[in-house]
């Protein structure tokens, strides 16, 4: 498993290097040269050569890590040698040993070739033959299924980069030959942030291709919706456009058919959602291009013009390349964020374990439990509260979690585990929802866990039925939590300061840790526990 993760990480790093090469390359020669070195390193090869066709019968060496002096001079007939045969067949060829004895092996003409023993020849063919990459070693090379997939993936990335470079060169403005693709890739290579990638994509695409509006919608797989994530349109109404279901939109059709969909006039198109806004903003023709990576849907890029016009072939190809590049970059950004967050997660898990140890020490010192079973059940509940936060983080944004989700998860757990069969308790989670970072989420989960347990155990010791309300209020600079129940009344002599109940002591300590305070009192025949602490904007 560790080896697979290392290979995946190495492939991701190599793809990032290829994107970086595209971002600052000033020519195709520079791009291929830097790509050859990046591929050599990623595949742990001793040499990497890149050939492209120079005429209908020959390939020419365009980049080499072992014989750069022959770049643009060495020609190889299509169909000749391992390289030429793989290119002609359009299929990858892996030779793990005894390369010189392979039936298709030939030496480079006029050269005392180094005694290479193994090779991999991978054609660059997205839709048409663009070239071939040749990797070599002087010793045997064991090609596993995983290493083959990795090699194909890396060459595919180079192929898309090269296709994008050429499309942008043809379609871009004369003052910027690389056009939108170069600018987008340059920032992609240096930015790990999805939002920045998307915003740059719509801004530069609109600028380079003279579109009136560009938008990117990303796929929300859970709800099967396309959610607007970036637009350069200044109109506030456009920025607030609702999520659209895949089956109800032109964008959804582009994804379903995996091809660009062109609409001559969105104002006259029955399937278009938002005619009024299109007329208000003066939008006419539209092209929707799916963002796909290896058959996985990421989202859709939509571009609008201010007049009815056609989209020419070069323009469509350039947009498709931009879309592919953006899809790869979005996935890279997500992987990079996940890698960083996993490191942070390890650190925070350690902190959480220390917190569990502290809670257990408090439990031991309290000495108030009538049985070992009761002590273990209380400790288990606190550990599960922390676990609930980690579970929610794994399903949401990895580093932030909604406070109402935390409350609802804890309520569900307590309903099944702590409410006695002869009790009828109704729970209601109400109020504002907002996101907490992991540290705050863990502390708030422990606070809610103790207060809900306290309400069940002490609020309904004698009262057979009633309600427990969990209320959240997010004010400008603070958060207020209330856990209220209309069961047993608090004793008349109740004073929180003199109460030795362990759960309430934990809440009081956690409230102070959050920079806030905790109170528990009777309000209109309800026992109301209140925790107020400063609001911290999620990082």
Image: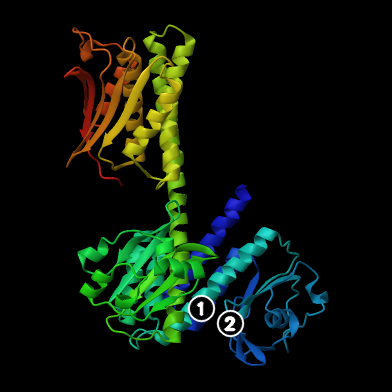
Residue count near mark 1 (Cα–Cα under 10 Å), binned few <14, some 14–19, many ≥20? many
Q: Quadrant of residue 153?
A: bottom right
Q: Quadrant of residue 448?
A: top left
Query: Is residue 71 something one can see in this rendering?
Result: yes
In this picture, residue 142 sits left or right of residue 149:
right
In front here: 539 or 480?
480
Residue 287's x, y, as percent? Answer: 39, 76
- Secondary structure, mark 1, is helix
Residue 131, compared with residue 47, is above or below; it is below
Judging by the rendered image, the residue that carries numbered circle 2 is: 130
Residue 293's x, y, as percent? Answer: 51, 65
In this picture, residue 471 sits left or right of residue 408:
left
Query: Is residue 354 something one can see in this rendering?
Result: no
In this picture, residue 50 sits left or right of residue 281:
right
In front here: 114 or 240?
240
Q: Which mark is residue 162?
A: 1
Q: Are marks 1 and 2 in contact (CB under 8 Å)?
A: yes
């Amino acid at each position: 498993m560790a080896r697979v993760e290392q290979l995946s990480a190495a492939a991701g790093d190599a793809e990032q290097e290829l994107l970086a090469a595209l971002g600052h390359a000033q020519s195709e020669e520079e791009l291929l040269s830097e790509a050859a070195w990046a591929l050599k390193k990623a595949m742990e090869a001793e040499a990497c050569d890149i050939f492209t066709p120079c005429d209908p019968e020959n390939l020419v060496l365009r980049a080499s890590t072992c014989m750069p002096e022959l770049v643009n001079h060495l020609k190889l007939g299509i169909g000749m040698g391992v390289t030429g045969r793989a290119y002609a067949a359009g299929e990858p060829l892996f030779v793990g040993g005894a390369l010189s004895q392979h039936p298709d092996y030939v030496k480079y003409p006029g050269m005392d070739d180094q005694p290479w023993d193994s090779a991999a020849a991978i054609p660059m063919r997205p839709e048409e033959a663009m070239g071939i990459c040749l990797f070599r070693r002087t010793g045997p090379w064991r090609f596993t299924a995983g290493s083959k997939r990795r090699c194909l993936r890396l060459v595919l990335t180079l192929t898309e980069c090269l296709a994008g470079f050429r499309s942008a060169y043809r379609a871009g403005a004369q003052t910027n030959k690389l056009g939108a693709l170069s600018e987008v890739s340059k920032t992609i290579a240096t930015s790990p942030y999805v939002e920045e990638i998307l915003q740059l994509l719509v801004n530069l695409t609109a600028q380079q291709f003279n579109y009136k509006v560009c938008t990117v919608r990303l796929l929300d797989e859970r709800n099967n919706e396309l959610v607007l994530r970036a637009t350069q349109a200044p109109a506030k109404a456009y920025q607030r456009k609702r999520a659209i279901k895949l089956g109800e939109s032109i964008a959804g059709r582009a994804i379903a058919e995996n091809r660009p969909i062109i609409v001559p006039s969105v104002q006259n198109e029955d399937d278009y959602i938002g005619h009024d806004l299109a007329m208000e903003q003066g939008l006419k023709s539209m092209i929707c291009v799916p963002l796909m990576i290896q058959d996985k849907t990421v989202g859709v890029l939509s571009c609008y013009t201010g007049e009815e016009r056609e989209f020419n072939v070069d323009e469509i190809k350039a947009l498709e390349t931009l879309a592919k590049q953006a899809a790869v970059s979005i996935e890279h950004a997500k992987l990079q964020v996940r890698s960083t967050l996993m490191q942070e997660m390890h650190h925070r898990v350690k902190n959480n374990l220390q917190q569990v140890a502290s809670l257990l020490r408090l439990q031991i010192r309290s000495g108030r439990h009538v049985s070992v079973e009761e002590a273990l059940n209380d400790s288990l509940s606190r550990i599960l509260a922390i676990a609930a936060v980690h579970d929610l983080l794994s399903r949401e944004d990895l580093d932030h979690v909604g406070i109402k989700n935390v409350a609802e998860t804890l309520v569900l757990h307590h309903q099944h585990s702590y409410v006695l069969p002869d009790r009828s308790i109704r729970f209601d989670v109400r109020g504002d929802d907002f996101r907490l970072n992991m540290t705050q989420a863990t502390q708030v989960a422990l606070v809610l866990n103790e207060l809900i347990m306290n309400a069940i155990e002490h609020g309904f010791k004698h009262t057979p039925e009633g309600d427990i309300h969990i209320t959240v209020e997010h004010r400008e600079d603070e958060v207020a939590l209330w856990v209220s129940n209309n069961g047993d009344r608090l004793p008349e002599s109740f004073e929180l300061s003199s109460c030795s109940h362990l759960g309430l002591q934990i809440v009081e300590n956690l409230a102070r840790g959050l920079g806030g305070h905790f109170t528990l009192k009777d309000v209109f025949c309800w026992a109301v526990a209140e925790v107020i602490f400063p609001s911290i904007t999620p990082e």
